Amino acid sequence: MTQAETLLQAARNAGAIIATAESCTGGMVAAAITDIAGSSAIFDRGFVTYTNAAKIDMLGVKQATLDAFGAVSEQVAQEMAAGAAQNSNATIAVSITGIAGPGGSDHKPEGRVCFGLCYQEKTTSLTVEFGALGRTQVRHAARDHAITLLLNAITSAPN
């Protein structure tokens, strides 16, 4: 059973509905979930917000947050996750924003990905440094990490 199939089963058992807000992964999390037959029972929608304008327009990310912290930040990831939850029928939302590469800077290196999770009226975030694995590997690692975040939140939630 794949990680996404395990997520589907856990979400179904918990009555959870998922939304995603993705930047550097360009919809890979939504695709991994919707590749599975029956995912319509637990997946509401995905937002691909690659530009700052899309993050503002579709998810309500504040321009001030982008100006202060940049698109690749935990603050923006939190606002993305909260916006996905607010603009959907989801009970849990995950967001991803990062530097897939190639490139980056000393301040924000290639492989840095920020995640947000909005669940049970609480929004959290974290940053993972995947390193300069190459664009494809960073995106796949970010996709897999987001699915793990969803799965862990759903399975550890009190009933």
Image (cartoon, rainbow, N blue to C red):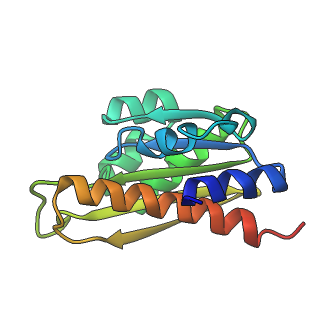
Q: Is residue 89 visible?
A: yes
**Residue 127 location, quadrant:** bottom left
**Total residue callouts:** 0
Q: Is residue 132 above or below residue 14?
A: below
Q: Residue furthest front?
A: 1
Q: Residue furthest top?
A: 57
Q: Is residue 103 left or right of residue 117?
A: left
Q: Is residue 37 above or below residue 152?
A: above
Task: Quadrant for the C terminus, please.
Answer: bottom right
Of residues 60 and 155, the one nearer the viewer is 155
Q: Which residue is found at the position 62% from the left and 53% from the top?
A: 5
Q: Which residue is found at the position 83% from the left and 56% from the top?
A: 14
Of residues 2 and 16, the one nearer the viewer is 2
Q: Is residue 73 visible?
A: no
Q: Which percent across, then down, holds residue 72?
A: 31, 55
Q: Is residue 45 left or right of residue 153?
A: left
Q: Which residue is found at the position 73% from the left and 43% from the top?
A: 17
Q: Is residue 74 left or right of residue 109?
A: right
Q: Which percent across, then down, holds residue 38?
A: 70, 36
Task: Quadrant for the N terminus, please.
Answer: bottom right
Q: Which percent across, then down, holds residue 44?
A: 66, 33
Q: Is residue 131 above or below residue 119?
A: below
Of residues 85 and 69, the one nearer the viewer is 85
Q: Which residue is found at the position 83% from the left and 49% from the top?
A: 15
Q: Which percent across, then down, holds residue 48?
A: 42, 34
**Residue 152 location, quadrant:** bottom right
